Image (cartoon, rainbow, N blue to C red):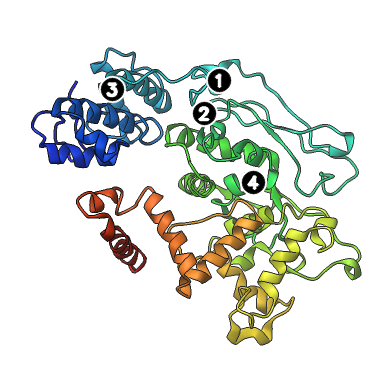
Amino acid sequence: MSLFLQDLTPIGNNLTVNRLNRELGVYATLSPSELRSKNKSEKILLLKEAVSVHLGNLGSWGALPDWRPIDSLSVESLKDEIGKRQGSGVGNKASLCRELEILNRVDLGLPPLPQGSPAFESLPVNEGTNVPAVTGTMDFQAGVTPTLVIPPANFTIGVSELNSPGSPYPYNSANPVVSVLNSAAIMHFGQHVPDFKKLVSDYTALFLFFGSGARLNHDAVDLPIGSVPQIDVINMIHDKIAAHLMVATPARTFSELVASCKKFVCLEGIQLSASDFILPESIQDQAHIDEGVATMATISQWGTQELYRAALFTFLARGLGTVQSRTHTGNHALKALDLDFLSNNSNGSGLLPPTLGHLAGPNVYTLQIVAPKFNQYTHLSGDRTPCDISEYFEFRTLNEGVKNNCPEALDKMLLETLSGPKCELPLLQHLMCDAPTSDWISITNAAKYQLISQP
């Protein structure tokens, strides 16, 4: 099998010793003395081994010897490559990627993946027909953990009940814990996201995944903040986008997960009406409630992407369904968000511009100004969705730091840029391979300036 460098130069005797030394500096960890002790043939073998390991670790499924990532191939190309290697070529895109990964590792001379680590271990290809029609209950007062029944692609089963007699708000908790079947498409799509299994058991996170990309009918725009879709609606949305989730490249970060789910929901043109939501518990005694976003905001007040921002606020506040969850003493995350939304910006913090500081306070005018700015990071690259309240304020601080040319913020953004999938300098070591050590700092600083100063 022929192996190539990233510029598709064959790895062999055609490479000069200087080129071999440079490439080994990129793909292998050899000291100068070790390099000098090797002859050309040994260096070629070492480079082939190092490049094979590098290709095997690229992307979600590795890359072929010609550097094409397996997860970038179409279904037809996957079947073609599998056929060349005498494979079966049967299944959906995810299973085809898995099969080609196994065959490709053989071609690259790499050991097989250890047992127990396959990406689809919890998602058998033919499991759909064997999944029982499970239903759950949302009656928390009865002490029963509810089950969120989400089917795999192209398979429909019953939905959970949402009955809790005698209570207008069916949960005993502002943010109920749910369980998701391992066969659900979302379990495949989010499997690489850190702490995903914990996140997917969070009801408000499911609202963020499956509700924030929907459009609202006119009767739903005035729903109060804290309203969440009914569980059968979440099941319905998942079922509609399951086919997208099964063939898409699995998400690697929480932001990617939310953005992709939102995009797929938008593609399906899903619309929700007021009857699709559960309203938060009604507040009888206003005297014991802290005035803030949770008591003033309706979904319509969040500007563009109104449902996404309302869902994100509810998620960061850890649920706003109960009266206790909408008090500052009972919900410290809500208190922090209210201060960020409604406090004076004279000290440089808060979302309200300093020039409008006189409007600060729990009033509808402040909310109308601030709500459309929520989760907008104009000085940071890419779309970001924080996975908790601490990450939200971390993004806010980083955005302000880059805006004010704070060295620590610029350094952090540089590291993110260099390690990101769209980095414009993926092989920074190439800039340094022929430079003396004394010049490395100046080269790094020049690269940093170039990256940070780009519009």
Q: Residue at x 66, y 73 (%)?
A: 367
In contact (CB < 8 Å): disc 1 and disc 2: yes
Three-letter code for the amino acid on which mark 3 is drawn = Leu
Residue 108, label in figure? 3
Q: Which residue is mark 4?
A: 205
Secondary element type, mark 2: loop
Q: Nearer the viewer, mark 4 or mark 1?
A: 4
Q: How many marks?
A: 4
Q: Residue 293's x, y, as percent?
A: 72, 67
With respect to residue 185, does 254 lie above or below?
Answer: below
Q: Residue at x 45, y 73 (%)?
A: 405
Report the disc number at residue 282: none
Residue 410 image point, x, y percent: 44, 65
Label 1 and label 2: CA atoms lie apart by 8 Å
Q: In this rendering, would 48 be left or right of 164?
A: left
Residue 395 drawn at (x, y percent): 55, 61
Q: Crowdedness of circle 1 by 10 Å Cα count: few (<14), some, many (20+)?
A: some
C-alpha gap between disc 4 and disc 3: 40 Å
The residue lying at 31 percent from left, 34 percent from top is 69
- The reply to whether residue 89 is in sight is yes
How far apart, in angstroms, are the residues tagged by discs 3 and 1?
A: 34 Å
From what the image shows, is residue 315 above or below residue 288?
above
Earlier-in-chain disc, 3 versus 2: 3
Question: Residue 331: x and y, percent?
Answer: 79, 58
What secondary structure is found at the residue carrying circle 4? Answer: helix
- The numbered disc on residue 128 is 1
Q: Residue at x 75, y 47 (%)?
A: 175
Q: Nearer the viewer, residue 428 or 350?
A: 428
Circle 2 residue: 153
Q: Amino acid at mark 2?
A: Ala
